[in-house]
Amino acid sequence: MTAPKASATGPTLAQRQAKWISELEYEAIPVDVRERARLLLLDFLGVARRGATLPQVEPARALLADLDTAPQATIIGGGGKAAAAYAAYANGTYGHSCEYDDGHMDCGHAGVCVIPTVLALAERKGSSGKDIIVAIVAGYQAMIYSMGPINRVTLDIGWHGMKVGGVFGAAAGAAKILGLSELQIANALAIAGSDSSGTMEYDQSGGEVKRFHAGIATRSGLQAAVLAGAGLTGPLTIFEGLRGIHRLFSERGTVDVERFWDGSWHIMNTFVKLYPMVGTVHAALDALGMVLDRNPAGADDIAEIEVGLVDWAVPHGAAIVHPHDMLSAQFSLAHACALRVIRGQVAIADLADPVIRSDAQINAFAEKVKPVAIDVPDGAEQLFGQVTVRFTDGQTETVLQHAPRGHPKNPATGEDIKVKFREVVSGLLDEETVETFIATIENLEQHENASGLIAQLG
């Protein structure tokens, strides 16, 4: 079964989306799509639980303490409760703070915009597990309908696709949970467009504000849905209009909307990260690991590592050699390769550690990593990585990874995602709690009131 198709003529793009979202029912969602939504929910919650422990999210806690909002929804990691919009804000920020959350080539990071929004309102309303699954699927679909036509060009310009498009995914998920009418959903999307923005200067010079882009999108999208439900209206040509999102963020270029209305369930093309790094470097780390597995080598045994990447990935993941904070470390191909060679892994704890970032051996080795832009090889995906290791004894080995592990063309299995969940919550939850929670997610649709999910994670 495919997702419903929409007519190419007549209503505006916001109205077309609203009709699809309004008519979406649990029974129309194929079994594999439901399973994908459950696994992505588990993935988000594990990463967010770990993210809640990181120092870079402290400003979010300070903001919530300052606002002291109504206790409507739970903040993950024992953070108490806040108004739904701000619980979603905190949880989205925590989910994105590890650089370990899911991604999508057509919109950036959908899960951290959609899922915390859905969960916050579901808790407030006492929604069922089925309601949560439907709203998550609707949110991912809407975010790609909204952002897909311009995502590639915004990356070139320097706009952050997740922040630009996240407001629409959040608004759609919120609208579905709230049970808004078709017209109200269209207005929610239209209202959300006024908060659509966000640059990627962080991937050039660092700065932790990037972590908060997901939280800001969730808050804005949720508020847009609530405002639409209260009667506020917006421009229904928010996407294709003269001053609409698609025209402005493409610098008035030509965009292809219709290819995203092809009947696909877009959530199925989500990339599950298996390294806590920007997605553009994952295939290179896979390839480097393959070389080292066959030829165990230390830092002194390697003269140079040349990494071939698609052209747009070089400034988005390979521009930083010597990171100065955790975010810049997670956007540094050179630093990640150094960690893999010298420490044998690329782990959250090491990326967060300023002592490791300043280690002389790691920084010296990072200078041996040489990123180069190359054409996408035949049969490879945009997120490919080609690694050539030149050893000091004169040997050379090259490995091409066509798509990183976790990519839709090299997908993570359900067991991969469960292993990752256990890894990220290790030391935070006891084993019994972990396994009980995994079982809860696996049987989510059996729960008539699934509002206590976040509270179970402490």
Image (tube, rainbow, N blue to C red):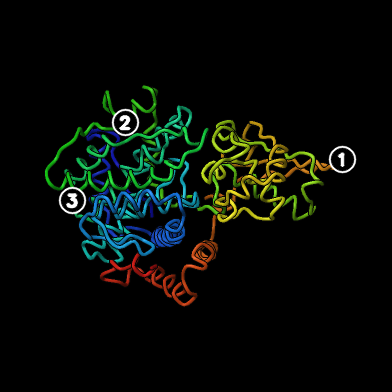
Q: Amino acid at mark 1?
A: Gly
* 236 sits to left or right of 430: left
Viewer-closest of 406 and 280: 280
Nearest to N terminus: mark 3 or mark 1: 3
| Residue 107 disc label | none
Dot 2 crowding, Cα within 10 Å, few <14, some 14–19, many 20+: many
Residue 211 to residue 424: above or below: above
Q: Which residue is mark 3?
A: 180
What SS does tag 3 mark?
loop
Nearest to N terminus: mark 2 or mark 3: 3
Q: Which residue is mark 2?
A: 245
Task: Tell whether label 1 touches label 3 (CB within 8 Å).
Answer: no
Q: Amino acid at mark 2?
A: Ile
Nearest to N terminus: mark 2 or mark 1: 2
Q: Amino acid at mark 3?
A: Leu
- Give the x, y percent position of residue 409: 55, 49
| Residue 394 disc label | 1
Residue 106: name its quadrant.
top left
Q: Marks 2 and 3, how far apart in space? A: 23 Å
Q: Is residue 61 visible?
A: yes
* 251 sits to left or right of 328: left
Q: How many marks?
A: 3
Q: Residue at x 50, y 37 (%)?
A: 206
Q: Is residue 32 visible?
A: no
Q: Marks 2 and 1, how far apart in space? A: 53 Å
What SS does tag 1 mark?
loop
